[in-house]
Every structure is written in C-alpha cells, then in structure tokens.
Image (tube, rainbow, N blue to C red):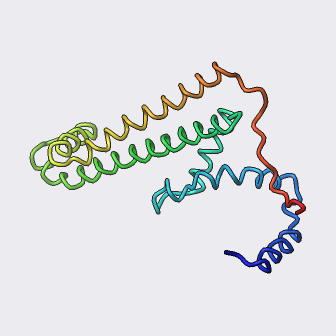
Amino acid sequence: MRSDKQIEASRRNGALSRGPLTPEGKSVTSRNAITHGLQARDILLRHESPQQFEQLLNSNIARFAPQDDTEMRIVEEYSVAEWRLRRAWTLIAALIDNRMDSMAADVDQAYEQLDHATRAALAHDHSTKTTMSLRELENHVSRYSRATDRAIRRLQHLRKLAPPSAALQFPANEPKDL
C-alpha cells in the first residue's frame, strides 16, 4: 500500500505534466487507450512488426469508424483475426517453399521438366501426407477467415439494431486538477 507521502508526491508530479501541446500530439495521445488496450505484445510474434499491426488496426478504425466501445472491440477482434489470417498465409507459403527446396533434388531426378505450380503441388501433397503442420495452418486460415466475417456481421447487425447517435469520443489525456 502506498504511503500518504507517495500519494502526495505523485499528485505534485502529475500537476507538473502539461501533456502534448500540438494538435497532432493531442490527436495521437487521445488514442493511447486504443493502441495500449489491445496489448499488441500478446498478439504479435517476436519477429512481427508492432508498427505494421498498429497500421492495420488504425486502417480498420478509419474504415469502420467505430462509434462506441462495443464497436471498437469488434474492430479490434477483426484486426487480430485479419493479422492472424495473414500470418497463416505467410507460414503456409514458407512451409511449401521449404518443402519444394528439400524435395528439389529428388524431383529433378524423377521428372525431366516441371513448372513451378506442379513443384508446389507436389510439395503441398507431400506436406499434407507427412505432417500435420500444413493441415493445421489451413484450418487456421478457415478459422480466422470465419472470425473476420463474423466480426463484420456483428458490426453490421449492431448498427442495424441501434444506429450510433454520435461519433466515439476518446477521452482527452490531459492532467486533471485534484
């Protein structure tokens, strides 16, 4: 538990903060609750770009213009499902590319000439027979695709039931007098 001295020191320090001064700075900080509330670190893998995810999220916010917290949550869910769908596509391509590379010598020996599509088909076929990874990723694609569709339908249904009365107002991140 914090002492009275610590509480008072926090109040004094908070009173010194003036926050962003420019309109651009105020606009950016007014959305802090959105970007931080989603906790991108729980969604992204270490090698994935938080900036690209934020760009996707902000693009979806601009596109769908959520009008309240419920709509915002749906847009966030849509963005996460879309991100994971893109990840699954990337992983599927990497698995098939890797399998084509590992099969190249055997395929070149068995066939005189093969086009890239046939090489990819052989790699896909071999991968689905020998490992669960490709099948699981393809199931993920279906699941995330359904999740994005479901989020859009929920947003449309919600707006049909009760059209929003006003634009979503993000709280200003300005210091308050205590």
| Image coords of residue 46 (percent x, y) | 47, 63
Compared with residue 105, is residue 126 higher up or lower down, i.e. above or below? Answer: above
Relative to 165, residue 3 above or below: below
Q: Is residue 60 left or right of residue 44?
A: right
Q: Residue at x 35, y 41 (%)?
A: 140
Residue at image location 77% in from the left, 55% down from the top: 29
Task: Using the rendered view, name the quadrant where residue 51 is placed.
Answer: bottom right
The C terminus sits in image quarter: bottom right
For image coordinates 68% across by 22% down, the residue present is 162
Q: How many marks?
A: 0
Query: How far across and how far down the image is residue 21, in percent?
Result: 89, 60
Q: Is residue 5 left or right of residue 118?
A: right
Split into 4 quadrants, where in the image is the N terminus? Answer: bottom right
Front residue of 147/99: it is 147
Q: At 23% across and 41% down in the image, what residue appears?
A: 124
The image shows residue 157, relative to residue 46, as above or below, that is: above
Q: Return the residue nearer the eye: 146 or 88.
A: 146
Query: Which of 149 and 174 lies nearest the eye of the viewer?
Result: 174
Say which of 60 and 103 sits in front: 60
Residue 169 quadrant: top right
Would residue 52 appear left or right of 171 to someone viewing this image? left
Identity of the residue furthest to the left in this view: 110
Left of 49 or right of it: where is 162?
right
Give how far across and how far down residue 167 sits, in percent.
Answer: 77, 33
Residue 115: image x %, image y %?
25, 39
Residue most extreme to the top: 160
